[in-house]
Amino acid sequence: MPSWSVYPLQKDTFGKPSDTVVYKRGKKVIDYSGWEPRVSMRYAFTKSFSVKASYTRNYQYIHLATMSSVSLPTDVWMPCTEVIKPQISTQYALGVFKNFKDNNYESSIEIYYKDMQNQVDYKEGAQPSDNVYDNPDNAFTYGKGWAYGAEFFLKKREGKFTGWIGYTLSWTWRQFKEINYGIPYLAKYDRRHDASLVLTYDYDKQWNFGLVWVYGTGNRGTLPNGFFIYEGSISNDYGLRNSYQFPDYHRMDLNITFTPDRQKHLVRKKMRVEQRYAKKGKDASKIVVPRKWLKITKTVTP
């Protein structure tokens, strides 16, 4: 195994590497670091009503790049390099929290804004084969992003009927000079609506019924609007980046849970053993039973 790696720096007019840089094994190429402060504050007006605010700053040293110009979208995770810098995100959040009826009901409304720097994405028209004999960094372009939205939540904590419902309304944007003519566009994983519903009903100590329902708008992608023939070959004509939205996703799960009464079952089992001994004329008080039975039931003497 070689102790060094070679990456092309420049190319000639035919696209072949004309210069290289050599890194020996174990040599540090680049070093990144940064502060990640987190601040959270809460002010309680009453025992059941409060306001919370938070500030968070994060660095991410591995990047998800999506290639949407192939037949199936291709996601690639790329680490930081001399060219690819760490992503920096700064998030601000503000929420109002209120409980009702002796804290039996919980409710909250939160809004947030997130700023993202050093975002990574593939250039327009990039193909997986472009990285062969080339530095993968040359296939990427770099820009910024931002996201904002609101979250609504309601929960019932006590009683036979419990559950919660949550809904999120959000937008996630990206902007690159070399993509979409520099016009901001919605990110692949932008989800305008996201809703969840969880319900539970305890009929008695043994029977329990549950329901789970989730709904989310579809992801976004770039699909061809048509095709054209150039020099005898067919090429696709793509529209604006992530201009197509895939179908919405929703699912409902129903469940029924039955929990046997173990204590009642052990009592019946012990009584059956005693009846068998009684029929044979033996002393039922001398029956030897497991200790775990004795912890649950009382010794029965004839």
Image (cartoon, rainbow, N blue to C red):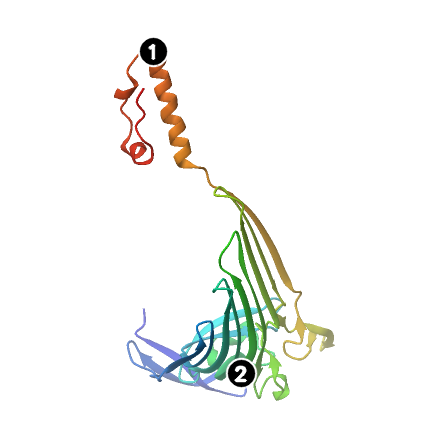
Element class at badge 2: strand
Task: Say which label, 1 or 2, has the lower sequence index.
Answer: 2
Residue at (36%, 12%) from the top-left corner?
279
CB contact under 8 Å: marks 1 and 2: no
Element class at badge 1: loop
Residue at (47%, 82%) from the top-left corner?
92
151 in relation to 161, above or below: below
Count of marks overlaid on the render: 2
Report which residue position mark 1 lands on.
280
**194 with respect to 234 (left or right):** left
Residue 219: x %, y % from top left: 61, 69
Q: In which quarter of the image is the N terminus?
A: bottom left
Query: Looking at the rendered structure, which numbered label has been put on residue 90?
Result: none
Residue 179: x %, y % from top left: 60, 84
**207 with respect to 21 (left or right):** right
Residue 16: x %, y % from top left: 50, 82
Quarter where residue 218 is shown: bottom right
Can residue 234 be seen? Answer: no
Q: Quadrant of the C terminus?
A: top left
278 in relation to 292, above or below: above
19 in relation to 152, above or below: below
Query: Looking at the rendered structure, which numbered label has been put on residue 145?
Result: 2
Query: Between 214 and 244, which is closer to the camera in this rendering?
Result: 214
Question: Looking at this rendering, what residue extends furthest in the top direction?
Answer: 281
Residue at (53%, 83%) from the top-left corner?
145
Quarter where residue 268 is shown: top left
The CA distance from mark 1 to mark 2 is: 84 Å
Q: How crowded is mark 1: few (under 14 residues within 10 Å), some or many (20 or more)?
A: few
User: What amino acid is at disc 2?
Assistant: Gly
